[in-house]
Image (cartoon, rainbow, N blue to C red):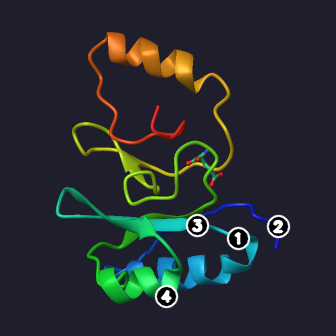
Amino acid sequence: MINVCGIVGCILKEEDDVAPILFDCISKLEYRGYDSLGLATFSEDKIHIKKDKGKIIEVDKSLDLTDMPGSFGIAHVRWATHGDPSKLNAHPHVDEENRVAVVHNGIIENYNALRRKLMDKGHEFVSDTDKEV
Ligand code: GLU
């Protein structure tokens, strides 16, 4: 096991649901090691997110990960570096207006300085991760 998180992005040409493909792709990344996971899809002008800590099969049992609308999306398997493995800290993260969803691999070294700067400007954070910044 190498403990490196994984990212998937997919845009379908047809108006078909992308969630089963994202699910299949993150399942293929399981060997890399992870502690939490999440999917984001987009349809009807809205971002849909399903995420939690745990193994893909367990999270799928409780959230039904392949049942999400939209023909494009992103997915992530996380290996936590900043913030515990949890539903709140799992990627994707969204902005305060729910208009942008982001997944990220690695570490944002200056996230604390950036976070403080953004909080001074009135931004609020819901997770403990470096990546939400
Ligand atoms: N540093 C990020 C976090 O802790 C990303 C970790 C990763 O690469 O999975 O959420």
Quote the CA–CA distance across marks 4 and 2. 20 Å
* Residue drawn 37% across the image and 89% down it: 61
* Residue drawn 35% across the image and 17% down it: 119
Task: Quickly name the residue at label 2.
Answer: 2
Quote the CA–CA distance across marks 1 and 4. 14 Å
Q: Is residue 22 above or below residue 89?
A: below
Give the crowd class for mark 1: few <14, some 14-19, many >=20 residues within 10 Å: some
- What element does badge 3 sit on? loop
The answer to whether marks 2 and 1 mark residues whose Cβ atoms lie closer than 8 Å is yes
Residues 82 and 92: in front is: 82
- What element does badge 2 sit on? loop
Numbered badge on residue 35: 3
Q: Is residue 16 left or right of residue 34?
A: left
* Residue drawn 19% across the image and 56% down it: 45
Q: Is residue 59 left or right of residue 2?
A: left
Query: Residue 84: horizontal and vertical position, in percent?
Result: 52, 51
Quote the CA–CA distance across marks 3 and 4. 12 Å
Is residue 9 in sight in this rendering?
no
Numbered badge on residue 57: 4
Query: What amino acid is found at the position of numbered circle 1 in the picture?
Result: Gly
Residues 72 and 107: in front is: 107
Disc on the earlier residue, 1 or 4: 1
Disc on the earlier residue, 2 or 1: 2
Numbered badge on residue 33: 1
